[in-house]
Image: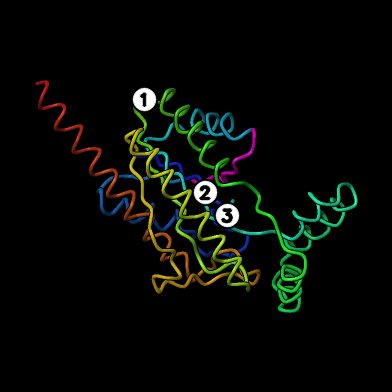
Amino acid sequence: MKVLKLGSSGVQSERLQPGALVAHEIAGEKLRIALGEHVEMRARLLWPSAGMIPAVQKWLSDAQPDVLYMIIPTFWFGYESVPLRLERRFGRFGKRLATTGLRAADNPKLAYNPAFRAGRRLAHALIGGETHFAPDYVVTEIGRLLRSVLTEHEQLLVVVHGPQGWNAYHSSKRANRRAEERRLFVDARLRQLCGELHVPYFGTDLPMNERGIQIETTGDGLHAAEQSQEFLGEKDFRYLHQAICAHRASLDVAARATS
């Protein structure tokens, strides 16, 4: 069985210690044991830009998976970025400042520094931030992607992991409440959409941090660390195993009905 996982930058191992397993590798091994068959699970970074649909169609054409597992990160519409606000409010000058800030945030030597993170919190409190994408946009684009995939790949099992929230992104309670309101909106809309399309959907009314689940992060406070990969891999395994078993059971029922 081939599984293609699409998710946030958490699918990448570059931020982890050498040799550390990423969640999809852990989930793939657990699936292999549970299903008693060879499982090949790959992961790609999903970003809802204009080129998302053709990129995903190409990945599907290249990988020929049996299962497409899509994770919708809260980060897309939940995290309020100071560099993005500067870029959108101050034009060319703001773009230069934003580029400098984003490069710094992508540099582990700076991003993992407590002083840098404190400065980021202060900047957010003083300047504010803006999200990468609006909730409505995310729902619309994921809907377009799902319809495109289901039309072109009728035999493919598509599974959607809704935005479940990790740790509180911001030091401001007000900003965290805004992020949670957006998450609930996207979760409800995607749950409805997947129901209409008969796509298995896994979401939650409460974010992880309000369920007593704390995701340990790397030094930048945004990416899951090594000790959290096992938890995330186990969660991916549970969702995939449930969806795969239900899908196979429905195929068996349909086969018996026509025999």
Q: Residue furthest right?
A: 93
Q: Which residues are magenta?
A: 42-50
174 sits to left or right of 234:
right
- Residue 45 shown left or right of residue 252 in the figure: right
On the image, which quarter does residue 217 sit in? bottom right
Residue 232 drawn above or below residue 52: below
Disc 3 residue type? Gln
- Amino acid, disc 1: Glu
Name the image quarter holding the C terminus.
top left
For the point 35% across and 38% down, the residue is 199
Q: Is residue 71 magenta?
A: no
**Can you tell which mark lies on residue 12?**
3
Tell me: residue 242, above or below residue 60. below
Q: Secondary structure at mark 3?
A: loop
Which amino acid lies under the numbered mark 2 shown in the image of this protein?
Gly
Label 1: element kind: loop
Question: Foreground residue, 50 or 67?
Answer: 50
Which residue is rendered at x = 77% and y = 70% of the image? 126
Count of numbered labels shown in the rendering: 3
Q: From the image, tell me which residue sits under label 2.
A: 7
Kindly report which numbered mark, 3 or 2, lies closer to the viewer in this rendering.
Answer: 2
Could you say which quadrant of the image residue 245 lies in?
A: top left
Coordinates of residue 83 in the picture (x, y in percent): 77, 57
Mark-to-mark CA distance, 3 and 2:
9 Å
Q: How is the image coloured?
A: rainbow
User: At 66% from the left edge and 59% from the top edge, which residue is drawn?
Assistant: 80
Residue pointed to by mark 1: 154
Q: Nearer the viewer, mark 1 or mark 3?
A: 1
